[in-house]
Image (spheres, helix red, strand yellow):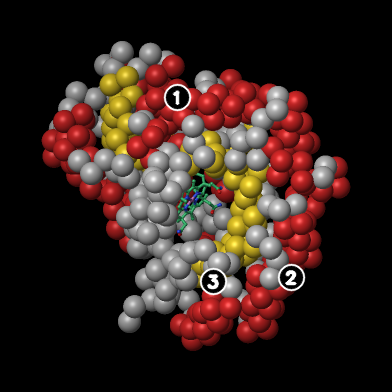
Amino acid sequence: MGKIVLFAGVDPLATGESDYAWHPLSVLTVGTALKAAGHEPVVIDCQIDAGWRQRLREQAQGALYVGVTCMTGPSIGNVLEAIDIVRAHAIGVPVVWGGYHASLAYGGIVGEGLAEVVVRGPGEAAAVALAELAQSGGSLTDTQALGRIPNLAFTDGRSELRGTGLRPRVLTTAYGFAVDPDTLPATDYSLVPVEAYYTEEVRDLSYISSFGCPHPCTFCSEPQTSLRRWKALGAERVVTELEALWKRYTPDQISLLDPNFSTNTARVIEIVELMERRGLCIQLRANMRAKDVVALARHIDLARLRDVGFSAIFVGCESGSDRMLKLMRKQATVKDTVDGCRMLSAAGIVQLTSWIHDLPEESEEDSALTLRLLQDLARLPHNQQKHHFFTPFPATEMYEALFGATEDDGRTQRQWAQSDTYAASPLWAGRPDFRRRVLEELEDLQREHPAVLVRSLPRLAAH
Ligand code: B12
C-alpha cells in the first residue's frame, strides 16, 4: 500500500487569528480513512512545522499523490507554495486539492491547472478511491476512471467558453454529502503530534461531532458544501470518544468544531445526560445558534450543560437589525440573540458572539441597531464579541449576487488568497466611511468593556 502526503495549509498563527495552533481536522479525517484502508498517510502541517518545505520536498517523492487543503484566504498562499515544491521536486506526483476553499472555487483551481483533481465536500471516500486508482497503476488524469469517483472536479484538457474567455473545460462527478458518519472510523489523532499544538496558556484539542447545516444563510458557504443537510455521530459515540481523548491527551478544553453543534437539540440533551450518568466534566466549547439555545432551555436547565463542562458557546449573531437578519436569511431574530445570550449568561456560560459589519444593503439605521445591541450585550456577565467586516466568500449566495457565478468569475487563487475578514480584503473594501464610523464606535466599546472585545478590531483597507 502506498504513501499519501497530506499538507495542511491553514495557519491562523501566521495571520494572527489565533495564539495557538488548531489540530487540522480536514487532513486528520482524510488521513484516518486512508490509514483504515491500509495506506500510509503522512501529515505535514505548516502551523507546527517550521521545516515543512524541506519535509514536503522529501516526502512527496514516491507518494501516490500529495493532498493539499486550506480555507479561502491567506492560507491559499501556503498551498500554492506547497504545490510549487511538489511540481519542482516530485515530478509526476499528482496533486489533489480538497477542503473548504477547493470545494467552492474548484473551477478556478482546475482551470489554472494547479491540481490534477479537486475533491469537493466530504473527502474520505474520494481520497481512498484516488489512492486505489494510483496504486493500481492508473493515472489521476484518466478522465474515464475519475468519472467513476464521486465528489471530484478535473479537466479533460479541452477548452470551453466561460465568463470572459476560453478556459479549460471543468468536469464534475456526482456530489454526495449524505454518508452516515457513524460508518467512519474514529479520527486517528496519532497522525499528528497532538501536544505540539498546545501552548503554555492553552491545551486545546479540536473535535467534530456533526457535519453540515440546514440553514440557508446567504453569507455562509455551508449551504453549498452540505446542501443544507446535517449528519451527526450518535450521542453515545461522541461521549465515549470525548472521554477517551480527554484522558489520553489531557487537554484543558476540547473545541467542538461542528458548523452548528445544536442542530438537533435532542442530541445535545442526550450528550449532556450521558455525561452526567458517567460523572464526566470535560471543558467544552461549541457553536450553537441563539435560537437553538432558547429551544434547548425549554427542555433542560442550561446549568446542567455548564456542569458537564460546556464553558463557552460560539454564537453567530451577525447583526442587531431584524431587517438585515431577514435579508441574509438567518432564520432567526434579534430577540433570539438577546434571549439566547441572556440564558447562557445566567447559566454562567461564556457567549462568544460574532458580528459582521458593513453588509451589502446595511443602512446607517441597521448599523445603529447593531451597535446599540452590542452595548447591551456587553453588560451581560460572560459576554464576548468578535467583529468582522463583511467579505464575500466564494459560491455563497451573497458573493454570487455581487459578482455572478463563482465558476465564471475568472479569479485566480492568488487573488482569493487576499480574502480576509480582519485586515480588509482588496477583494471587497466595502464602504470606507461606514467602516470608519463603526470602528470608532467599537473602539469606544472596547475602552468601556476591554474584556468583552476578545480579538483585535478589524482593520480598514490600506490606501
Ligand atoms: C475550525 C475552523 C477554523 C479554524 C481552522 C483550524 C485548522 N487548522 O483547520 C480557524 C479558527 C483557524 C478558522 C479560520 C478561518 N475560517 Co474557519 N472554520 C472552522 C470550522 C468551524 C471547522 C472546520 C473543520 O475543521 N471542519 C472539519 C473538517 C473535517 O472538515 P473539512 O475541512 O471540510 O474536511 C472535509 C472535506 O472538506 C474534505 N477535505 C478537506 N481537506 C481535504 C484534503 C484532501 C486532499 C481531500 C482529498 C479532502 C479534503 O474531507 C474532509 C472530511 O470529509 C468551519 C466550519 C463551520 N461551518 O463553521 C469554519 C469555516 C471553514 N471557516 C470559514 C472561514 C470564513 C474562516 C476564515 C476565512 C475567517 C476569517 N478570518 O476570515 C479563517 C481563515 C483561516 C486561514 N488562515 O486560512 C468558513 C469557510 C469559508 C471558506 N470559503 O473557506 C467556514 C465554513 C465557516 C462559515 N460557516 O463561514 N476556521
Which disc number belongs to residue 188? 1
Precedes in sequence: disc 1 or disc 2:
1
Ligand 1 within 8 A of label 1's CB? no
Q: Residues within 10 Å of mark 3 (few under 14, many from 20)?
A: few
For marks 1 and 2, give the CA distance. Answer: 43 Å
Of labels 3 and 1, the one closer to you: 3
For marks 3 and 2, give the CA distance. Answer: 27 Å
Whole-percent x and y of residue 174? 52, 33
Whole-percent x and y of residue 306? 70, 44
Do the residues under discs 3 and 1 have CB atoms within 8 angstroms? no
The number of discs equals 3
For marks 3 and 1, give the CA distance. Answer: 39 Å
Q: Residues within 10 Å of mark 2 (few under 14, many from 20)?
A: some
Above or below: residue 344 compared with residue 196: below
Q: Nearer the viewer, residue 396 or 424?
A: 424
Query: Which residue carries the number 3 mark?
Result: 450
**Residue shown at the point (58%, 20%) measured from the top left:** 183
Of labels 3 and 2, the one closer to you: 3
**Residue shown at the point (82%, 48%) measured from the top left:** 297
The disc labelled 1 sits on which kind of residue? Asp
Do the residues under discs 1 and 2 have CB atoms within 8 angstroms? no
Query: Which residue carries the number 2 mark?
Result: 322
Of labels 1 and 2, the one closer to you: 1
Ligand 1 within 8 A of label 3's CB? no
**Residue shown at the point (60%, 41%) measured from the top left:** 284
Precedes in sequence: disc 3 or disc 1:
1
Whole-percent x and y of residue 202? 45, 46
Q: Quadrant of the N terminus?
A: top left
Judged from this view, the residue extending furthest toward the right is 298
Q: Nearer the viewer, residue 412 or 158?
A: 412
**Residue shown at the point (34%, 78%) measured from the top left:** 462
Mark 1, secondary structure of its residue = loop
